[in-house]
Amino acid sequence: MKLTFVGGASTVTGSCYYIEVNQWKILVECGMHQGGNGAGKLDRAPKPFKPEEIDYIFVTHAHIDHSGLLPKAAKDGFKGRIIATKATRDLLEPMLFDSASIQESDADWATKKAMRMGETPESPLYTTEDVQAVLPLFDVHEYDTVYHLGGGVKFRLLDAGHILGSASLEIWYQDSAKEKKIVFSGDIGKKGSPIIKDPDAPDAADFVVMESTYGNRSHRPLKESIDELVAAIKSTFKRGGNVYIPSFAVGRTQDLLYILNNLVREGRIFRFDVWLDSPLAEAVTKVYVAHPECFDEEARRFFTTRETDSSIRLHFVKTTEESMKLNKLKSGNIIIAGSGMCEGGRIKHHLKHNLWRAECSVIFVGYQAAGTLGRKIVDGAKIVRVLGEDILVRAAIHTVNGFSAHAGREELLEWVSDLEGTPTIFVVHGEDEAAESFSSLLAEKYGYITHRPVDGETVEI
C-alpha cells in the first residue's frame, strides 16, 4: 500500500489521505482547508491524484474540514462511490449546499472587486449544481460490520463518538503474503458527551493514522464547564447584556441546546430566550432528531419527554432581516450563531454590533484554529477587524473548552492503548506542539513507533 498525506497532516484542517492498494485508488477524507493562511489557495492547488481515477472516498464525519471538497471532486471528474454512515450523508446534504452558497457568494464579491480593477473574474470553488451531482454517489454503511471491496481489501466503520454519524475507519488489505490493517481515527470524541454514544476503539492494527488535536492537553470535566457556563450567563444577565456564542452548526450547537434545556429543567437558570441564528444549524438539528439510533440512553429519554414549560424558549432565526433585528435586544438573551471560529456567517455581524459592549459576553465553546478571528479574540486582542471595521473588544470573553467534541489527551491515549503488538502511529491533525507532544507520549507510554508526516509526504506500508 502506498499512502500519501495530501492534507491534514501538518495542520488541523483540510484532511485528505490518498491510498493506492492493489487495483484500488482511494481517498480517506476530502476536506476543505479552513481559517487563514491561504486556505482558499490550498483548496485550489493541484492534488497528487486525478479525481476521475479515484474509486472510493471514505468520509469519517460531516465536518467540512473532512468533507468540504466532495463537490469539487465531482466537478473535477470523480464518479466513484462515497462511503459514510447514513447520519453523515444526511448531515452533509444541508452542509454542502450551505458551503456551495458561500463559495458562490464569495466568488461574486471577488469578481465585482476584480472587475473594478480590470482583473480576471473569480469562479467559485464549486456550485450548488456540483453538490447536486455528488449526492447520488453516496453509499451508506452501518457501524460494526465488515464489508468487502474485493481485490484483497475490506473495511469496517466504528462509532467515533465525535458528532452524529462520526466513524473511525478500519481497512484490511493483502498486498503481500500477510494481511495487514490500517486504522484512520477520524476525529475521536470524548466519553460522556451530550446526546451521542461514547467512542469505540479498535483492538488491533499494524498502522494507525491518528488525530492529535488536543494531544498536549486535557479538557476540563463537563460538570465544571457547565458550572462555568452558568456563571457566565448569570453574570452577563446581571450586567444587563446578552450572551453571544459562536458555535459550529454540527454537534456543538445541538449539545448546547441540550445542556441549556437541562439547566432550565433543573432550575439552575430561569427560563430565557435562545436565538439560533443559523439556518444551517436549524437544518442540522432536524437531522439530529431524525437519528435517535445514534443517541445514548440519557438523550433518548430526554428527547421523548415533552416539558415545554420548563424548557428554554428557542427561536429559529431564518432571514437576514430577522437576524438584524436581534441587535435591538439589549439584555437577557443568548444568541448562538455560526461560524464557530468567527470566520463567516452571522456571528460576525453580532460581534461588530456587540463586541464593544462591556455588559455583554462572548463564550467560545470550540476549537479556534490559528489565524481565525475567534483565535485572535481568545488570545486577548484588544482591537479586531470585523467586516472591514476595527472593533474594540470590551465584552467579557470566556473560553469553556469542556464542551469540545474532541477527545482530550488522556482519552486519545486510552483510545489507542489496547492495540495488539507495536503498531506504527502516524500522528496527524494537530498543531505542531500538540502533535509533537502526543507523538512523544505514545512512544514513552506504550512503546509505539510514531511518525509525524507532513502534507505531500508518501510512505510505503
Image (spheres, helix red, strand yellow):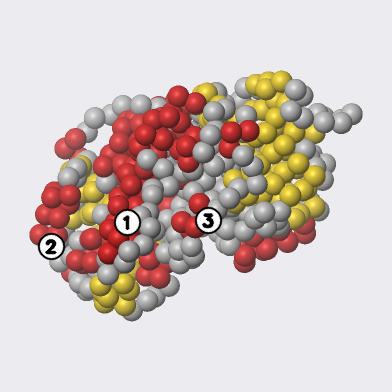
Q: Are marks 1 and 2 in contact (CB under 8 Å)?
A: no
Marks 1 and 2, Cα distance to the nearest angstrom?
37 Å
Dot placed on the residue nearer the N-terminal end, 1 or 3: 3
Q: Amino acid at mark 2?
A: Lys
Instruction: Report the mark closest to the observer, 1 or 2.
Output: 1
Marks 3 and 2, Cα distance to the nearest angstrom?
41 Å
Please indicate, yes or no, whether residue 110 appears anywhere in the rendered image: yes
Say which residue appears at 61% left-offset and 25% top-offset: 144
Q: Which residue is mark 2?
A: 330
Q: Nearer the viewer, residue 373 or 213?
A: 373
Dot placed on the residue nearer the N-terminal end, 1 or 2: 1
Say which residue appears at 49% left-offset and 26% top-offset: 137
Measured along the vertical axis of the image, is residue 351 above or below residue 129? below
**Mark 2 surroundings within 10 Å by alpha-carbon count, few (fewer than 14), some (14 through 19), many (20 or more):** some
Measured along the vertical axis of the image, is residue 409 above or below residue 67? below
Q: Which residue is mark 1?
A: 111
- Most extreme residue toward the right, as rendered? 177
Q: Are marks 1 and 3 in contact (CB under 8 Å)?
A: no
Location of residue 333 in the rendering, given as x and y in whole percent from the top left corner: 18, 55
Say which residue appears at 20% left-offset and 61% top-offset: 242
Instruction: Report the mark closest to the observer, 1 or 3.
Output: 1
Say which residue appears at 37% left-offset and 34% top-offset: 129
* Res 308 → quadrant: top left
Q: Amino acid at mark 1?
A: Thr
Q: How many marks?
A: 3
Q: Are marks 3 and 2 in contact (CB under 8 Å)?
A: no
Q: Quadrant of the N terminus?
A: top right
Q: Amino acid at mark 3?
A: Leu
Please indicate, yes or no, whether residue 247 appears anywhere in the rendered image: no
Location of residue 334 in the rendering, given as x and y in whole percent from the top left corner: 22, 54
Residue 42, numbered circle:
3
